[in-house]
Amino acid sequence: MAFSTVSKKSGKTYYLHGREVTLRGGRLQKIFYFAQDVREGAMDAVPAGYEVMENARTGLPMLRKAK
């Protein structure tokens, strides 16, 4: 089951996803993003060292490094 969070502003449900992308210099980078549907790359939990926050203006969830 994919990790999900509900926006406090809009009430919509978002699911956490992650994937590896190749940067221009050839380096691999892991990226995380939220989508309104479950797609390939859905994650079961928030990665260690990260926490979910919500953008106050748009209501979209984001990951940030835990303080």
Image (cartoon, rainbow, N blue to C red):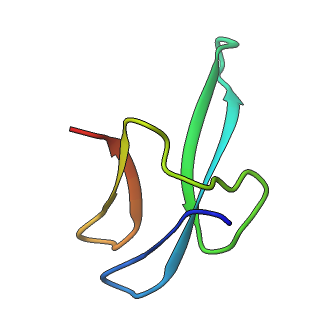
Q: Could you tell me residue 63's position as x and y percent?
A: 40, 49
Q: Quadrant of the C terminus?
A: top left
Q: Quadrant of the N terminus?
A: bottom right
> Which residue occupies 73% across, 51% down?
41
Q: Residue furthest bottom?
A: 11
> Which residue occupies 53% across, 71% down?
14
Q: Could you tell me residue 43's position as x and y percent?
A: 64, 53
Between 67 and 26, the one lying in front of the other is 67
Between 44 and 34, the one lying in front of the other is 44
User: Residue 31 lies in what quarter of the image?
Assistant: top right
* In-image side of 9 versus 35 (left or right): left
Q: Could you tell me residue 8's position as x and y percent?
A: 31, 81
Q: Looking at the picture, does residue 66 appear above or below residue 1?
A: above
* In-image side of 64 versus 28 (left or right): left
User: Residue 60 lies in what quarter of the image?
Assistant: bottom left
> Which residue occupies 55% across, 45% down?
32
